[in-house]
Structure formats: structure tokens, C-alpha cells
Image: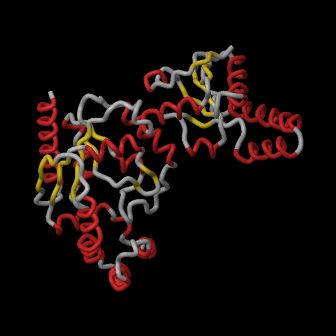
Amino acid sequence: MARLSADVGLEALTRYDALIDVRSPGEFAEDHLPGAINLPVLNDAERAEVGTIYVRQSKFLARRLGAGLVARNIAAHLEGALAARDSGFQPMVYCWRGGQRSTAMTTVMDQVGWPVTRLDGGYQTWRRQVVARLYEPRTAPGLRLVLLDGLTGSGKTAVLSRLAARGVQSLDLEGLAEHRGSLFGGLGVVQPAQKLFDTRLFTALGRLDPERPIVVEAESSRIGRVTLPPVLWAAMKAAPRLRLSAPIEARVGRVLEDYAALEHDAEVRDNALRRLPRHHSREAVAAWRQLSRAGDLRALATALMQDHYDPAYRRASRDVGGGDLGEIALSGCAAADLDQAADAVAGAVARLSSDKG
């Protein structure tokens, strides 16, 4: 008989050879346990068909159809994705709430001889843990955050990526959200659903030491289509800030390098410019679109910084709740400049830790 466990701690999950999500691909895409693989016992169309028959015709007919589909799909997985697994394979299997779909899969796997575990409560057990950590301030542990702030193009993301090598904890929210948090930030990339973003964030935080500072790039409450959960957002608003600064010429160069893929796609650029906030005049937007169509991306980036990004940053900076840890000035955005800035951030974080100690 399959074992039953409700332990979904990150360390506990590493004990299994595989986490098998038997829900439909659509459910899996919305969210899943970290590192899980999708071996659905019903695909999206099959699940919809069985559900429709269950509601409109007969529970018996729906169950009979579902049983046949589940049996065929499990057989396909045994002959496909699971064919190379030996007798020592120890997976955890789950569905939506630990019901019929995961029971069907674990029953067969147990008969094969694999020591399989079924997640008690299914995916919902995992989701409750994530919600308690990110959405319930009364139960969530505190976060010691340091915000890395600065105007667009000042190298925040590049500096953030250099901190781990200097022994500093960091959290890359834009990486987790697959969006750069700007007008052009999500072009060509499909962002995760909100619940999947939450899982990525929960997992990333679980790998960090909550007693030590965590450097995170200053963001708005939304990154593309995902929203920062309230526990994180409250901690960010209260966190002290380190500010990066750089000459506008260096910032423009950095932006052109980061968004080089857009150089040859005028249509995508134009569609993004159409989404600018309405407070910009029609004349200004028309001028920016003309620069884009002409391929003068340096002039476009400069204009957008001066008249869109920088004013928006200064407005947002008026409502800063945490302390100011000072400014780190970069003379440029070359690798050496970014390394020096990362060294300075590491030094500031070390001093902050020493003061707290």
C-alpha cells in the first residue's frame, strides 16, 4: 500500500526521487510543487469531457469513461516516462486534493513494486503552506530586506547577480517573474501564473537564511502581470535602501545592451509604446514612435529615460518607508564598474549586519 504524507517542507521533498503531478497539463501550468514532473492521468480535454458527463448525464457513465482513460494514460506513462525506473524508485505522487487521480496512480505503482508516497491533501496542502508564508502577516516569519534602488539602466540587476559570489544573500524578483519590470520587460516571454510565481518565491526564500539580510531590487508592487504577495511587499516598503547612480550615457548604453533583441523588431517596439500611460501627451508619444520607426534607439532610450522612467522613479521615491543607506556612484556600466558596485553593496550589507548584531 502507498505511504501517505502531508510533509511538504522543502527539505522533505528532496528525499524523493521524483515529484509526480498527475493533474492535467493546464492545472500543472498554473502551479506545481518545485521540480515536479507532469504525468497526467487525464489531459485537459479528457478531464473536461468526464466532468461534463458527470454533471449533465450520469455519475456512473463519467466514472466508467474516466476509469478507462486513466488506465490507458497510466499504462502509457509506465511504458514511457517511467520505463527506465528501477525497483528502488521512490516517488511522491499528488493530484488536486489527494483524491481519485493520485490514488489511481499510486495503486498501480505500488503493485509494480515501487515504494511510492501519496501526498495527503494533494496540491492544496502545498498551496496552504505557500499562502501562510506569503499572504498571512500574522503567521509569516519576518524578512530582513535591503533594497537595491536606482534609476533605469543603473545596473541594479547586474549588480544583484554578482552578490552571491561575495557571500551576500539576494533575491531576483524579475528572474522569478520572467519580466524586467519595465515597458519592454516582458516582450517575447510568457510570464508564470500568479500561483506559480508564488511557489518560485516561496522556494527561493526557503533557501535563504532569514536571520541574515537579503538584497532585493526595488520594484513596484507588480512585475508585469504578477503581483508581489503582501508579506513581501510590506517588508520591501519598510526596508532600508542602497541607491545606485550612473551617468545617463552609461545608463542608455546599459539599456540598449539589455534589450538588444528588440533592435530589429520595430513592430514590437511600437506596440509597447502604444501602451504608455495616458498622462504622456500625444505629441510626445508620437515623437517616441517616430524615433523607434527610424531605428534611432539611442535617442529613443534617452528620451524615455528623461521623460518617462526617471520622473516615475522620482515620484515613487517620495513614499519610502525604510532608511537610506547611501548612494553608490558608478562612472559607467562596464563589468569593472559593476564589480566595484557589488563590492560596495557587500560592504554596506556587512556593516548593516554588524550594526544589527
Residue 273 vertical position relative to residue 58 in the rendered view, above or below? below
Give 199 or 166, whichever is nearer the viewer: 199
The image position of residue 143, as x and y in percent, is 30, 35
The image position of residue 146, as x and y in percent, is 23, 42
Give 321 or 95, whichever is nearer the viewer: 321
The image position of residue 135, as x and y in percent, is 44, 39
Looking at the image, which residue sits at the far front?
Answer: 138
Give 2 or 71, whichever is nearer the viewer: 2
Quadrant of the snapshot with the C terminus: top left
Look at the image and tell me whether residue 21 can be seen: yes
Looking at the image, which residue sits at the far bottom?
Answer: 283
Tell whether 99 sits left or right of 148: right
Q: Residue at x 38, y 40 (%)?
A: 231
The image position of residue 133, as x and y in percent, is 43, 33
Q: Looking at the rendering, which quadrant does residue 40 occupy? A: top right
Quadrant of the snapshot with the N terminus: top right
